[in-house]
Amino acid sequence: MNIKLWITGLAIAMMGTSSAFAKDIFTAEVQVDGVTQMIGYNKILNVADQYESENMRKIFPNYSDTSALNAKLDLRSVPVNISYAQNSSTLVFKIPSLGIERTYTGATREESKEKFVDALEGMDKDLLKALTKEWVKNSPIDPVAGNPTSLLSNMAVSMTDSLSDMATNQAFGLKDQSSSSFSIMPRFGRYTQQGYGLNVYNLPLAYSHWFDSKKMGLVIDAPITLVDTEDALSGSLNLGVGLNFQVTSNDAMTWYLMPQVRVGATGSQDFGTAALIYGGGLSSNAQFPINESSNISIINMISYYKTDALQVGDFDSGYDLQNTIFRNGVEYSHVLHKTVAGSPLIAKLQYARTDFYGDQLYSDFQHDLSGSIGFKNLKPKAWIDEYRVGFTYTYADNNLKGFMVNAGYTF
């Protein structure tokens, strides 16, 4: 009970810090008739809607549809320009770093703005492919890739976590009457990524089954994630299916290999983002017993993922990435002398490093340090196999970091 209260208190404390790190996701320096104003937004459609006449007059009372307008925007860490020449309805959009320029002309400035929104929502594939590559390279908060809260990072971590859990269960014994288990492990995390505050709500669902020989098993897991980035929401779901093979088992070592395929999707109306990620790889978990109560596991993983277009709501942002990912780490598992209702407590401590190669990302590597404690229920007719609470601290390059707590059951 004390552990539960500690986790709840920590989660509330972390949620309470969110307002202290408030930062606009999109910013604009807008100039009209020599007058300049700074404006901030947390939703991409608000960026475009700003240039409706009614909204412009709220900031510039003398604005009219014939006024000259020039805006320098930070579009999720990508500098862009939007402008209207005097007496013109044509919206000019530029990405100076890429040498890209687009013009959108309607009968009115409102029609021109709508054409621009259509391009952002998926009509201009070439523009979006160029822009999304800049986002994952320059933005610390992209929902698709390039940071620890992105879908690509979560898919890579899930590959080794599902194998680690299954291998540990086998090492310390499953309930004899069942070789199948289902687990649910709600998680809450608080991350700071270059001044942005992110709350992460994650619900990993997993099913595993050992076949009769206990030398081959099936793993299916489906983490569901919601990320709140300064009130801009993004959601993701990914599904992994793997076959776990016990390659060898003796007194000195037990070695598991698991080929796995994964597919995931993420979308956000607030970010103007939608993407599909698919791929897979091979995970290895080599266990070395220290004694009858302790194991050290060496964890290795190589995987390859590709992104593709996906329509979510009004957005199809055309991500086109290819990345090879390596994850290597070590895990220590120990059966404690303490028991809960006659069942032993099992503690785990793990360190892992994940490296990303291929298309350039904002963060090329991340470190994860995690620990957990739980008990294996050895009663023959018990409803719950295992109860576990834990934490994960993550640090990535470019000063991205976060802390996650979790608690859940295995049935």
Image (cartoon, helix red, strand yellow):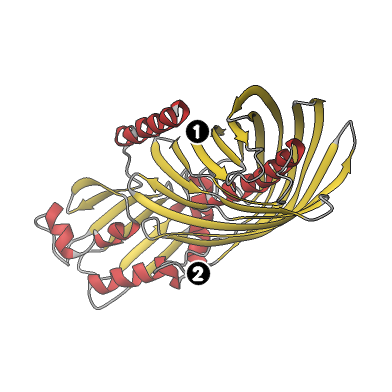
Rendering coords of residue 255 (x, y %): 83, 41
Q: Residues within 10 Å of mark 1 (few under 14, many from 20)?
A: many
Name which quarter of the figure residue 297 lies in.
top right
Q: Residues within 10 Å of mark 2 (few under 14, many from 20)?
A: some
Rendering coords of residue 324 (x, y %): 70, 50
Please name whichever residue, 342 or 202, is drawn nearer the observer in this view of the structure: 342
Left/right placement of residue 274 relative to residue 31 reads right
Residue type for callout 1: Lys
Residue at left 89%, top 31%? 252
Give the label, 2 or 1, closer to the camera.
1
Please name whichever residue, 49 or 5, is drawn nearer the observer in this view of the structure: 5
Residue type for callout 2: Lys
Rendering coords of residue 3 (x, y %): 47, 28
Q: CA distance from mark 2 to mark 1?
A: 33 Å
Rendering coords of residue 292 (x, y %): 79, 26
Residue at left 47%, top 67%? 316
What residue does disc 2 label?
125
33 over 65 or under it: above or below: above
377 over 310 or under it: above or below: above
Name which quarter of the figure residue 305 lies in.
bottom right
SS state under label 1:
strand
Question: On the rendered image, what quadrant is the N terminus found in?
Answer: top left
SS state under label 2:
helix
Label annotation for residue 215? none
Left/right placement of residue 2 relative to residue 290 reads left
Residue at left 48%, top 51%? 225
Left/right placement of residue 311 relative to residue 175 reads left
What residue does disc 1 label?
401
Farthest residue to the top: give it: 337
Please name whichever residue, 60 or 27, is drawn nearer the observer in this view of the structure: 27
